Amino acid sequence: MKTRRLTPYLFLLPALAVYGIFVLFPIVDSFRMSLYRWESPFLPPTFCGLAHFRNLLHDSVFWHAAWHNILLVAGSLCIQLPLAFLLALLVNPPTWGKTLFRTAFFAPMIMPTAAIAILWQYVYEPGNGLLTRLIQLAWPNFSYAWLADPACAMLWIFVTICWQYTGFHMVLYMAGLSTIPNELYEAARMDGASEWQICRHVILPAMKPAIAVSATLSIIGSLKYFDLIYLMAGGLPEVSREVMATYIYRLAFEENQGRYGYGSAAAVVLFLLALAIIVALRGRTRRDA
């Protein structure tokens, strides 16, 4: 009897071992490293306690990076997800070209991020970029360095992020829409409900699980976003280009800083922030359920 109970856990051991080595151990080790001043892997670290966390409180670049992450979260929840939901409603009915539209909107999600960065750098190129050329059809002398403007560069990068991930969330919503029985739509129409009332009182309540999953993935992705911003904003001044993940990377591995302990402290703050937001979101979802 005991052997039967232990058998499932034995099958789980390889996956748990991989998860522990490559996920849990780095998280725990980041907490440990954040308590040390470690300038080089060839020198022994020196214990500094919570000094790195106290320094983060006065680090203007870190707080600007955190603010950019918060803006990405807000933009994803308020712009990207509603747009994906609207596209799902438009593409979901059984009309001609439904599969084509699904594929077209989802295609950016499966493209390599480096290819997306190069593609959109051509779109945003100041002199001969696609966007500049389109605007020059109306204003021939128009010229604007889209990705070199510190005030708006993150906005244009966010447009690229929306282009990349909106189709993914659209597919999630379409999966949620497919679970709603047609009888509910028919009953609502027989009762005289308008399309807006059907959306509000039938679709939205049934879509809460899909919306919760989409929001959770969007928040996590916005907090840890790195690759596209790193590739597209490399030439911007430090304060205007950073999110927390890029700042952590630069602290530890770039510009001859070698501030591994300080970077680990920033990574711990990012982890705790993401954990707090997700726990709060999941708690609210359970209460609503």
Image (cartoon, helix red, strand yellow):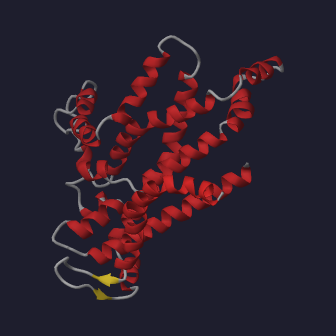
At horizontal 82% and vertical 17% (from top left) the residue drawn is: 190
At horizontal 36% and vertical 69% (from top left) the residue drawn is: 62
* Residue 208 figure quarter: top right
* Residue 119 figure quarter: top left
Q: Whole-percent x and y of residue 137?
A: 25, 24
Q: Residue furthest right?
A: 191
Q: Residue furthest top?
A: 96
Q: Is residue 254 above or below residue 151?
A: below
Q: Whole-percent x and y of residue 203?
A: 68, 31
At horizontal 21% and vertical 33% (from top left) the residue drawn is: 129
Answer left or right for 282 relative to 132: right
Q: Looking at the image, which is closer to me, 257 or 158?
A: 257
Q: Whole-percent x and y of residue 35?
A: 37, 83
Q: How many marks?
A: 0
Answer left or right for 254 relative to 75: left
Q: Quadrant of the N terminus?
A: bottom right
Answer left or right for 32 relative to 252: right
Answer left or right for 119 relative to 25: left
Q: Is residue 115 above or below residue 224?
A: above
Q: Whole-percent x and y of residue 55?
A: 36, 81
At horizontal 31% and vertical 76% (from top left) the residue drawn is: 262
* Residue 166 figure quarter: top left
